[in-house]
Image (tube, rainbow, N blue to C red):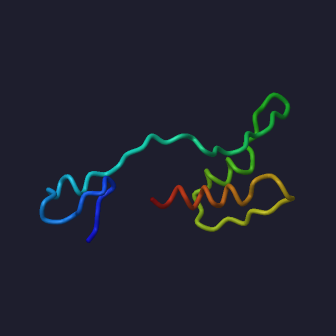
Amino acid sequence: MFTDSQGRPMGIGIPLTERLQPTITPTRLLWKPLKGIKVEGKMIKGSQELYMACPCHHVLYHGSRGPGKTDAQIMQFRSMVG
């Protein structure tokens, strides 16, 4: 027998609307793209900002260790699902 989150048996005795109530939790900002740099008084977008703003489906993203290539790829994927 299946039970709900409060340990009550799920079945005939529990109304359908009570069984299907979604649990909504507040979300926190967990990630944001790295900021760009200021060159000659102008802000130039960082590589993560450019990657997230790109409308293409396939992007070649390379560089040295540390600037967050993997983070940006995961967040780009995450923005398209769920």
Q: Residue at the spot x=12%, y=65% of the render? A: 12
| Residue farthest top in this picture | 41
| Figure quadrant of residue 34 | top right
Q: Position of residue 46 (x, y in %)?
A: 75, 45
Please state the horizontal and vertical placement of residue 76, each as a whole percent of the image: 59, 57
Compared with 35, 78 (above or below) is below
Quadrant in which the N terminus is drawn: bottom left
Q: Nearer the viewer, residue 59 or 23?
A: 23
Query: From the viewer's perspective, is residue 14 above or below residue 31?
Result: below
Residue 20 in the figure: left or right of residue 30: left
With 80 as the anchor, is 48 left or right in this view? right
Where, by quadrant of the figure, is residue 29 drawn? Answer: top right
> How many numbered tags mark residues here?
0
Q: Quadrant of residue 31?
A: top right
The quarter in which the C terminus is drawn is bottom left
Taking depth in this image into account, of 22 and 52 the one nearest to the observer is 22
Q: Residue at x 67, y 45 (%)?
A: 33
User: Residue 14, image x and y in percent?
Assistant: 16, 57
User: Residue at (28%, 68%) from the top-left corner?
Assistant: 2
Q: Residue at x 83, y 54 (%)?
A: 66
* In the rendered image, the vertical position of residue 65 relative to residue 23, given as above or below: below
User: Which of 12/59 is in front?
Assistant: 12
Residue 26 vs residue 3, the one in the foreground = 3
